[in-house]
Image (tube, rainbow, N blue to C red):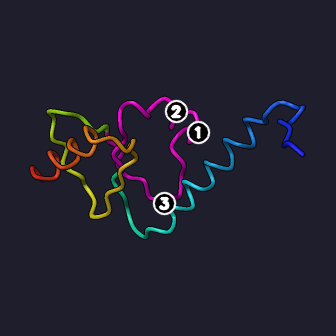
Amino acid sequence: MQAQPPTEGVNFMLLRQHYQRQFMKYLDEKAGNKSIYFDASLLKVLSLILGPRAAGHNQEQRLILQDHTVQQPAHRIVIFAIRPEIETVQKILWQKERW
């Protein structure tokens, strides 16, 4: 018996809400204010999923991970939302060396 694809379309609203809750739950697990670095290639996708800045999750600083501009995190807790690519990891290391 072979698995069949669903006959109805995918409910993207429910899918977006699920991933939004998961991301906010992760943020809430980390106590205190946070600086979040976003990979520039993920900004559109994450903006679609996360929507506007959510109140109550202590996201005080959102930054774009860049090649040549060092942006000092304002908080002790730093979160990176990146793709698992070598070039992206090198950007993180390059920035961290200059903090």
Does 85 appear above or below 32? above
Give the magenta part as a residue range: 36-63
Q: Callout 2: few (<14), some (14-19), or many (20+) C-alpha neighbours within 10 Å?
A: few
Residue under circle 2?
45
- The residue carrying pointer 3 sits among few (fewer than 14), some (14 to 19) or many (20 or more) residues within 10 Å by Cα, namely some
The CA span between labels 1 and 3 is 15 Å
Q: Which residue extends farthest front?
A: 1
The residue under label 3 is 27
Amino acid type, label 1: Ile
Residue shown at 53%/58% (left/top)?
A: 56
Residue 71: image tag = none
Along the line of sight, the residue nearer the viewer: 89 or 51: 89
SS at badge 3:
helix
For the residue marked with disc 3, what is the amino acid?
A: Leu
Foreground pick, 63 / 60: 63
Q: Are marks 2 and 1 in contact (CB under 8 Å)?
A: yes
Residue at (44% x, 58% y) in the render: 58
Q: Name the residue under label 1.
A: 49
Residue drawn at the location 23% of the way across and 34% of the way down: 66
Q: How far apart are marks 3 and 2 (CA)?
A: 18 Å
Which circle, 3 or 2, is nearer the viewer? 2
19 part of magenta stretch: no
Report the front residue among 39 and 24. Answer: 39
Given the image, on which type of amino acid does mark 2 rest? Val
Which mark is first along the chain, 3 or 1? 3
Say what secondary structure mark 2 lies in: helix
Tell me which label, 3 or 2, sits earlier in the chain: 3
Q: Position of residue 14 (x, y in %)?
A: 75, 43
